[in-house]
Amino acid sequence: MTGSDASASFRLAYVPGVTPSKWVRIWHERLPDVPLSLVPASPDEIYELLRGGDVDAGFVRLPVDQDDLSAIPLYTETTVVVVPKDHIVAAVEQISPGDLDDDIVLHPLDDALDWEKLPGRPALERPATTADAVELVAAGIGVVLVPQSLARLHHRKDLTYRTVTDTPESRVALAWPEDRTTDLVEDFIGIVRGRTVNSTRGRAPAPAAEQQKSKSGAKSAPRKGDAGGGARRKPAAGKAGGRTASKNPRGGGGAKGGPKGGAKRGKPRRNG
């Protein structure tokens, strides 16, 4: 439904790695009277918050269950491998999955990547979270592949990361309950999609009175050559005809109102 919002604030959830600051800043600029509350959530918790009505919208990672949630894909992240700084792959800018064949590749239960086949050798157990997997990497137990934003989030001085080509990638999307598409949700959708404040899809179009005034002004604008906006007067037929005939160098008398002497000057002389 679309209509008046039940709450006086907007509640926005987000999963680890997503940084909503730029969109929040635009929100405060456009809707300074509507507070925006940020709610951090795990990948599993965020769907409970959305469906339970605890938040109005949230930044999630695709895929999303489309049965009761709407989602707009926003961007795709680069996949990287987190390794100790003295790991062999730290000497290059990017690697392929085959370069990890001899490594134990950790696969956390909250993995944000959709793998058909995980590269490297599997660990005996799967870490509960990505944060736990990074701790194991720091302890020298394997490596872990994650979206780049998560590698930055869990940055440590003794670890680094490198781009991995030909791997699944994480896509971030804005999601909200399909049956609660409120005006504030529409406002936030406009912000993440980059619409301007004057967009026709926004909620703040120019008032009808101003639009009508603008149209009336356009119609009453003076045309080129008009004096004071008035219509140009059509010259009298007789005057126009007289001016036209007087400029005829041959004075053939073909035009009305021409001088009488014009015909005599054109008469041939008699011989003898």
Image (tube, grey):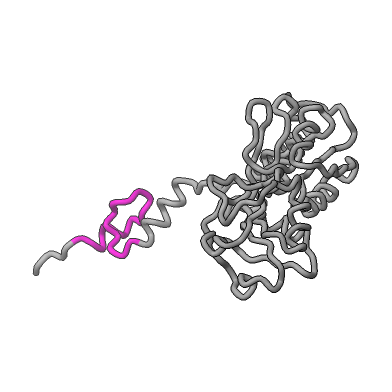
The residue lying furthest to the bottom in this view is 91
Residue 60, by quadrant, is top right
Up/down of 95 relative to 18, above or below: below
- The residue depicted at 54 percent of the width and 64 percent of the height is 99
Up/down of 175 relative to 170, above or below: above
Relative depth, front residue between 198 and 163: 163
The part of the chain drawn in magenta is 248-267
Position of residue 45 measured from the top left corner of the image (x, y, whole percent): 79, 36
Answer whether residue 3 is visible to the viewer in this image: yes
Is residue 2 magenta-colored? no
Position of residue 55 measured from the top left corner of the image (x, y, whole percent): 82, 34
- The residue depicted at 46 percent of the width and 51 percent of the height is 239
Residue 103, by quadrant, is bottom right
Up/down of 83 relative to 132, above or below: below
| Horizontal side, residue 250 vs residue 236: left or right | left
- The residue depicted at 78 percent of the width and 42 percent of the height is 42
Position of residue 242 measured from the top left corner of the image (x, y, whole percent): 41, 54
Is residue 261 magenta-colored? yes
Relative depth, front residue between 251 and 126: 126
User: Which quarter of the image is occupied by the N terminus?
Assistant: top right
Give the main secondary structure, helix, strand or loop, of the magenta stretch: loop
Answer whether residue 225 is visible to the viewer in this image: no
| Horizontal side, residue 96 vs residue 56: left or right | left
Question: Across the whole image, how many numbered discs are drawn on residues?
Answer: 0
The residue lying furthest to the left in this view is 272
User: Which quarter of the image is occupied by the C terminus?
Assistant: bottom left
Relative depth, front residue between 99 and 56: 99
Position of residue 164 measured from the top left corner of the image (x, y, whole percent): 58, 61
Residue 189, by quadrant, is top right
- The residue depicted at 77 percent of the width and 62 percent of the height is 139
